[in-house]
Amino acid sequence: MMNISLSNLESVIDHAVVKRGRQYWQRGLVQDLEEIEDGKWTAQVEGTQVYEVRISISDDTVTDYNCTCPYDLGPVCKHEVAMLYAIQERLSGVATTNKGEQEITRGSKRRRAKTGKQKPKTVAKKVDEVLEKMSQEEVIDLVRSYALRNREFRVILLAQATLRSGGDSKRAYRELVKESLRSGMDRHGFIDYWSTRRAVRGAEELLNKAVKLVESGNPEQAIPIFQAVIEELVPALQFADDSNGDIGGAIDWAFDVFYKCIEKFQDPIIRKDLFDYCLTEANRKQYEGWDWKWDFLRMASELISSGEQEKELFANLNCISQAEQSSEFFDLYNQEQAAQIKLEAIRKSGRENDINRFINDNLHHTSIRRLAIEQAFSNQDFSRVIELAKQGIEQDTKRQYPGLVNEWLVWLLKVAEKEENVEGIREYAGLLFFETGNFEYYERLKKTYSKSIWPDQIEKLLRHLQQRASFSTLAEIVIREKEWQKLLDLVRGHTSFETLETYHKYLAPHFPKELVEMYEKTSKELLARSMGRADYQDVCQILRRMKKLGASHRVRQLIKEFSEQYKKRRALLEELERV
C-alpha cells in the first residue's frame, strides 16, 4: 500500500490517475460521501458503473483504501483519488469547484469558527443516537423487517446468531455460507462480477469470528469454520465471475489461518483426524486445477507424527502429481509441488542423510536446485555452486526457459565476484547484460576495465549489440558514455516525434543544426499522414523547439508553407497561429 496523505496525494500518485480522479470529483461524480466512523469514509463514485469506495484516514494519513472497480494497473485508481479530493473538501470546508463557491464556503468556515460549530457527526454517532432513543421492541421490529426484505443483511444477522450460539456444527456454518452465496446469485444461479462482494459476506463474518477464536486460544472451535468456508466456496467458483478475487481471497484467507492453527494442536487424536481430513480433501474432484489441493497436502505434512503417515502422504503425493497430465508444463509443476512437500516432511523428521539424498535426486526441479545452490553458497562451497548452476543452464537451455538460465548465470556471477575472478565477472556480467538489458550488469562489467581500456571495449560491445539489442539499450549506452556523435547517428536512423522528444536534451547542446533538420523532416512527415488536432499540436511543439534552437526564420517559412499547403485544415491553421 502506498504512503499517501491528504496533503501530498498529487506528489505520490501517478499524474494521469490524479488528473482523471480530480476531473471525476470536479464533475460531481462522488456521491453519498459519508464518514461512517471516525476516519472511516465511504462513497459511491460514478464511472463505467457505480463503484463503492472505502477509505480510512488517521491524522491526515490514508491507512486503507479500496474500490470495487476492476483497475489493477497501479496501487490507486481514479475513483479513490476522486474520493480523496471529496474528503479534502469536506474536512476543509472549502469547495473548490468554482471561484464563487470557494468564497462562499470559506466565509461559512470563518462563521463556523466564530460560532464554535463542531464538525458534522459521523454516521455511527447518528445511528447510536437514534438507537438510544428507540425501545427494545422498536429495534427488534426494525431489524426483523429489514432482514426479511434484504437478503445480505439477513445473512449477516444469521451469521452473528450462529456464531453467538457457538455454532452447532460444521453443517450450520456450511448452510450459512450457502445462504450468503445465494444472496449474490441471479435467477440463473450465477454470481456476476458485481455480486461476488455480497456473496462472500457471510463467509467473511465466519472467518472474522474464526480469527478471534484462534487469538483467544480456542483454535479447535475455529477448525469447522475454515472447513465449511473452503468446502463451499471452492465449488462456487464454477458458477461465479471472480475476476476481482473476492471468493478466491476468502478461500486463501481461510487456508492461511487454518495453516497457522496446526502448530497449536498437540492432541494426537485431533492431529490424526486433521491429517486424514487433509488427505481426503486433497483428493476431491472439486480441487482439480486449483493449487488449494497442495495447501491441504502441505498441512498434512505438518501433521505427520509417524513413519506410516509419512508413507501415506507420499503415496498420495505420487498419485496426485501424476493424475493431471494436461501438458508437460503442468506435469512438471505438479511433480515439483509434490517434491517440495516431501522435502518439508523429511526435514521435519530431521533425517539429514535422507534430506541430502532427496535434494540430489530432485535437482531437476527448479526450487530444489535453487535450495541446493543457496545452501552451497552459504557454506562457501563455490565449486558446488558452479557445478549446480552450469547443470541448471544446460537443463533449462534444452527446456527453453531463458529466465531460469539467467538465474543460474547470476549465481555464477556471484561466485566470480566472491572469488575476485575478473574474467569470470566479465563473462557472466556481459552475458546477463546481453540477455536482459539490465544496466546493473553493464556497470559491473565496466568496473573490471581501466579508463584507458574501456573505450575500446565499448566499441566491441556496440558492434556485438548492433543486431540484437533494442534501440533504447544502444542509446542508453552511448548516453552513459557521453558519445554524442554516436547518439546522433542512432537517432537519425530512428527519427520520429517520440524519439526526438526523448533525446532532445542530450542532442540540443551539441547538434542544434542537425536537430533542426530532423525536426523539419519529422514535421512534414507528420502532416503528410495526419489530419487530427493532436498531431497538429505535436507539429507546433516541434516548431517551438526549432525556434528555441535558433531557427526562428525557418519556422516562419514553414508556417507559411504549411498554411498554404493545408489551407483547408482549419484546426491546423488555428494551432499554427499560436506558435
Image (cartoon, rainbow, N blue to C red):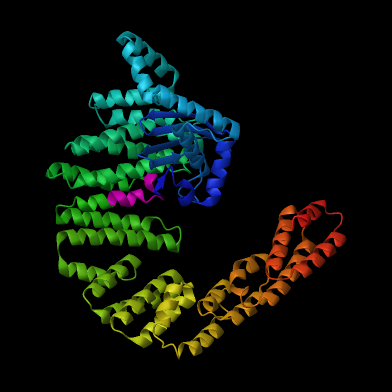
The kind of secondary structure the magenta stretch mainly shows is helix
- Residue 426 sits in which quadrant? bottom left
- Residue at image position (47%, 51%) is 11
Q: Position of residue 376 (x, y in %)?
A: 24, 74
Q: Which quadrant, please, contains the C terminus?
A: bottom right
- Residue 372 sits in which quadrant? bottom left
Most foreground residue, 559 or 201: 559
Q: Position of residue 127 (x, y in %)?
A: 37, 20
- Residue at image position (50%, 88%) is 455
Q: Is residue 287 magenta?
A: yes
Most foreground residue, 463 or 127: 127
- Residue at image position (54%, 42%) is 21
The magenta region covers: 285-297
Q: Is residue 307 magenta?
A: no
Q: Position of residue 232 (x, y in %)?
A: 36, 36
Determine if residue 131 is in view: yes
Q: Position of residue 430 (x, y in %)?
A: 44, 81
Most foreground residue, 336 or 14: 14
